[in-house]
Image (spheres, rainbow, N blue to C red):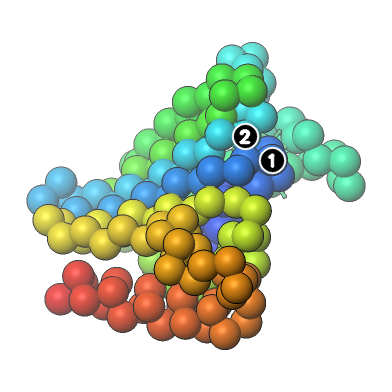
Amino acid sequence: MESLAMQLAELIQNSIEARASEIEIFFNVNDYSNTITMKVSDNGLGMNDDFIKEVYNPFKTSRKSRNIGLGLAFLKQEVDQCDGKLIIDSKVNKGCSIEAIFKKDHLDLPQIGDLDTTIMCFMTEADRINFSFIYQVNDKIFIFDTREIKKILGSEININSNQVIVWIKDYLKHNMEGIEK
Ligand SMILES: Nc1ncnc2c1ncn2[C@@H]1O[C@H](COP(=O)(O)OP(=O)(O)OP(=O)(O)O)[C@@H](O)[C@H]1O
Ligand SMILES: [Mg+2]
């Protein structure tokens, strides 16, 4: 079973493939509603309604390298197994938002996994794509925005340089642990 962090990575990868320049990632753990929610919204190519209806079919893909797309088919299966919900909202040339809601105490729920590493991996794209990551645990919230980081770094230092990416990983880990307490 793939961790939720790996499935989040699949959603972010889809947004990049849809040529988004803005990607918002939301991850919420809520004990009161007994849910874990992850949502990725982008301003990429989007999908029309007919495409959305069929998107869980593995043969529905815009991939050129192979004519099978497994990401959403697999996510849908996971969500269904955990009595969850998958909500897709998209408009052609406007963007796409995909939200997966899981029941937190469900026995089949995969591990959350390594969210900070997942976000860190996408920082190699952060020079051309703006990412925001909103991590919420009950009533505590941590917001990370690559636009803010870029502002601090100025024009001299690249956000996707190795040192900065290592720093971002620590920064995410530290702040995420801070609100998990
Ligand atoms: N954020 C998005 N914006 C626009 N289209 C999307 C988005 N996410 C998915 N799609 C469309 O849905 C199709 C199916 O996505 P899915 O993740 O299931 O497979 P894939 O990305 O094509 O292949 P794989 O995930 O196996 O690499 C994509 O090929 C793409 O056309
Ligand atoms: Mg995919």
Q: Is residue 131 above or below residue 47?
A: below
Is residue 14 rendered to the left or right of residue 78? right
Write the residue at 51% across / 67% down.
Answer: 154
Write the residue at 19% across / 54% down.
Answer: 30
Ligand 1 quadrant in view: top right
The amino acid at mark 2 is Gly
How many numbered markers are drawn? 2
Q: Looking at the image, which is closer to me, 125 or 14?
A: 125
Q: Can residue 161 be seen?
A: yes
Mark 2 vs mark 1, CA separation in Å: 5 Å
Write the residue at 59% across / 60% down.
Answer: 126
Is residue 135 rendered to the left or right of residue 152? left
Q: Which residue is mark 2?
A: 44
Q: Which residue is mark 1?
A: 19
Residue 109, given in percent of the width and then of the height, sits at 37, 58
The amino acid at mark 1 is Arg
Is residue 173 rendered to the left or right of residue 45? left
Q: Is residue 48 above or below residue 168?
A: above
Label 2 beta carbon within 8 A of ligand 1: yes
Q: Quadrant of the C terminus?
A: bottom left
Q: Can residue 55 be seen?
A: no
Please tell me in which quadrant of the rendered image residue 162 appears.
Answer: bottom right
Q: Is residue 118 above or below residue 30?
A: below
* Earlier sequence position, callout 2 versus callout 1: 1
Q: Are marks 2 and 1 in contact (CB under 8 Å)?
A: yes
Residue 104, given in percent of the width and then of the height, sits at 26, 55
